[in-house]
Amino acid sequence: MEEAWCVEQTWQHLAMAHWRVEPRVLMRHVPPGLELDRFDGHAYVSAVVFAVDPFRLRGLPPIRGMRRFWQLNIRTYVRRGEEPGVLFLRLETSRPWPARLGKLAYALPFEPAGMAVLEEGDCLSVGVISGAGAGPALSLGFRRAGSHMPWYEPAPHSLEAWLLNRYALFSHCLGTTLLTRLVHRPWRIQPAEARVGQARLLQIYGCNGEPIFACSAEARTARIGMPRPAPVSTHSTDKLSLARWMRSSKERTPARSSTISSSLRS
C-alpha cells in the first residue's frame, strides 16, 4: 500500500451473509460526512464471521495473546465523495485485547463478546452474546460449498463485487470522519447457505428474515494502515448522487438512441 501499514491480519474460515435493508432505517446509523451507498437503489447490511490467525504489528512477531480469535463484523456500505468504503456498525471479538486495540487506535465500535463457534466439515455455526448493553444475541449457521464448487472472483459490476471489493474503512471520532486503508489479494468466493436463529443484533439495523445472498471466502492476509482524517468532499451528497445518475444515464443513451434510430428507419 502507498502509505505505511501498521497491522497485519490473516483472516480464515470466512463466511458472509448479506441483507437488503430499508435505507431510512440505516440512515440513523450513518454519521455526518458519509453518504449511504446503494446498489441499484438498495442499501445492504452484511454479517461477516472469520478467525484471525495470526495477528501482528509491523516490525513485531505475531502476538501470542492475540492469536486465533474469532470476529463478527456487522457492516454497511457508504461513500465519502467518490470514495466507496465500509462503515462498521458493530464488531464483536472473542478476545478482549483486539476489542480494546480496535476501539482505541481505530475508533471502531469493537466489543468483547461471548462467542461459541462450531466448525464441522463444510458447516460453520456461530453464536454471539454481546458484552455491550443488554447483550443482544445472534446465531448464524452456514453450509459452505466446499469441494462441490470451484472458487471464483466476483464479476465486475456485480452485487458480489460491489459488496466485497472495498479497501477503505470509515469511522467517526470527535466530529471527524476518519479513513483507514487496507490491501489484500482480490477475493475468491463460493456460494453458501445461511440460516438465522437469534437475530437481535441484526434487527437493530433493519435485517429481517433470511439473507438474500451468502458466501464463503478464501483466507486472506490483509495489511491495514492507520486512520487519518478523510479528505474533505467538495461536493454535496445530492450533487454526487445526481452526477452518478447522469453518468449512468449517458451510458444508457447510446442504446436508446440506436433503438430510436432503428424504429425511425423502419
Image (cartoon, rainbow, N blue to C red):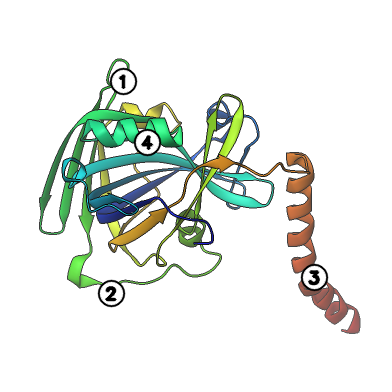
Which amino acid, by three-letter code, is at mark 2? Pro
Q: CA distance from mark 2 to mark 3?
A: 38 Å
Q: Which mark is residue 102?
A: 4
Q: Identify whether 255 is placed above or below 136.
A: below
Q: Secondary structure at mark 2?
A: loop
Which amino acid, by three-letter code, is at mark 1? Ala
| Residue, far front | 59
Which amino acid, by three-letter code, is at mark 3? Arg
Could you tell me residue 19's position as x and y percent?
42, 43
Q: Secondary structure at mark 3?
A: helix
Q: Is residue 208 visible?
A: no
| Residue, far left | 120
Which residue has dot 1 on it?
132
Q: Mark 2 or mark 4: which comes first in sequence? A: 4
Q: Mark 4 or mark 1: which comes first in sequence? A: 4
Left or right: 221 in relation to 159? left
Q: CA distance from mark 4 to mark 1?
A: 15 Å
Q: Label 1 near label 4: C-beta < 8 Å?
A: no
Task: Name which residue lies at 56% across and 42% down.
Answer: 228
Q: CA distance from mark 2 to mark 4?
A: 34 Å
Q: Is residue 59 visible?
A: yes
Which residue has dot 2 on it?
150
